[in-house]
C-alpha cells in the first residue's frame, strides 16, 4: 500500500471507528450539521449534470485521458471523508476500502472505478475541477452557466473557507474531541488555513482584525 493509500485508509478507519461509537443522538446531530453541505452538493451536481456531464464523460472518462482523475493522489479534506462515509451504505463504504487495497488502475486516482468515482459524495476539490478549455467552451455556449458557476464557488466558501466558522473546520473539531487524528485535518494543521483562522479571530489568543 502506498503512503497516500495508507493515509487515506487511516482517515477512513478513524471516521468509521468514531461513527460506530456515536449514540443515536450524536449521529442525528452530525447528520443535521452536514445536511446543508449535502444540499449544496446536490446543487453542484445538478449544475454538473446540466452543463458538463456529457462533455466530461466523452472526453475524459471514456477515453481514460482525464486530467482531474489522472493522478494517483487526489486532494481530500477530512470533512470530505466524513461526509461521504456518513451518507454511504455498507456496500459503498466497502468500495472505498477495497479501492485503497486494490486500486482499479495504478496510473489513475485510486478511487476511480469502472463506473466512475467510488465516493458517494466526491471530494470538493474534484467536484469543482473542470479543465479551462472545457469551461470556456461551455460558458461560451451557455453564458448563464458562468454566473451560476461563480455563485457556486462563492457558496462553497461558507463550508470551506475559515474566515468565519465553517462546517469543514467544525467537523474536524468534533472528531478531534473524540480523540481522532488524521493527516487530512488541514483546518487544524495547515499553516495557511490556520493563518486565515487567526486573522479571523477563530483561534484562541488571536485578534480579529475585522473588528
Image: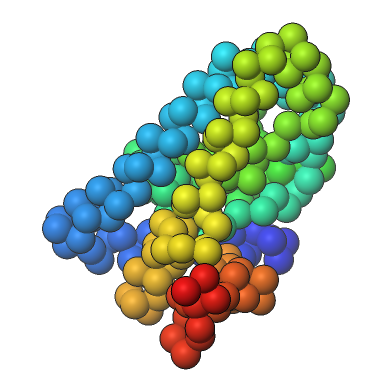
Image position of 121 with respect to 44: above or below = below
> In x, y percent, where is residue 95?
50, 41
Relative depth, front residue between 151 and 56: 151
Residue at the extreme front: 211
Asked if residue 104 can be seen in this view, the reply is no
To which quarter of the image does residue 189 belong? bottom right
Relative depth, front residue between 53 and 132: 132
Q: How many marks?
A: 0
Which residue is pictured at 28% across the width and 60% down the height? Answer: 20
Image position of 147 with respect to 76: above or below = above
Relative depth, front residue between 151 and 19: 151
Which residue is pictured at 44% across the width and 59% down the height? Answer: 166
Relative placement, left or right, of 127 versus 84 is right
To which quarter of the image does residue 8 belong? bottom right
Asked if residue 71 can be seen in this view, the reply is yes
Residue at the extreme top: 141
> In x, y percent, where is residue 18?
33, 66
Image position of 59 with respect to 22: above or below = above
Screen quadrant of the N terminus:
bottom right
Which residue is pictured at 53% across the width and 54% down the height? Answer: 160
> In x, y percent, where is residue 181?
48, 75
Image position of 175 with respect to 56: above or below = below
Relative depth, front residue between 194 and 38: 194
> In x, y percent, where is residue 208?
50, 77
Colour logic: rainbow
Which residue is pictured at 30% across the width and 52% down the height? Answer: 33
Amino acid at each position: 500500500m502506498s503512503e497516500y493509500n495508507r493515509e487515506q485508509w487511516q482517515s477512513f478507519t478513524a471516521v468509521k471507528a468514531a461513527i460506530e461509537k456515536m449514540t443515536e443522538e450524536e449521529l442525528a446531530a452530525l447528520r443535521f450539521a452536514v445536511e446543508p453541505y449535502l444540499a449544496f452538493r446536490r446543487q453542484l451536481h445538478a449544475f454538473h449534470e446540466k452543463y458538463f456531464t456529457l462533455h466530461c464523460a466523452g472526453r475524459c472518462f471514456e477515453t481514460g485521458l482525464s486530467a482531474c482523475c489522472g493522478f494517483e493522489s487526489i486532494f481530500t479534506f477530512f470533512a470530505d471523508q466524513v461526509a461521504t462515509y456518513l451518507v454511504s451504505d455498507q456496500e459503498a463504504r466497502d468500495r472505498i476500502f477495497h479501492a485503497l487495497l486494490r486500486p482499479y488502475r495504478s496510473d489513475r486516482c485510486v478511487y476511480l472505478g469502472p463506473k466512475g468515482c467510488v465516493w458517494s459524495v466526491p471530494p470538493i476539490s474534484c467536484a469543482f475541477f473542470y479543465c479551462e478549455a472545457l469551461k470556456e467552451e461551455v460558458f461560451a455556449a451557455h453564458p448563464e452557466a458562468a454566473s451560476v458557476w461563480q455563485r457556486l464557488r462563492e457558496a462553497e466558501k461558507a463550508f470551506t473557507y475559515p474566515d468565519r466558522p465553517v462546517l469543514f473546520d467544525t467537523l474536524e473539531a468534533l472528531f478531534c474531541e473524540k480523540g481522532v487524528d488524521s493527516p487530512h485535518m488541514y483546518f487544524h494543521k495547515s499553516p495557511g488555513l490556520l493563518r486565515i483562522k487567526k486573522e479571523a479571530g477563530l483561534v484562541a489568543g488571536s485578534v480579529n482584525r475585522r473588528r
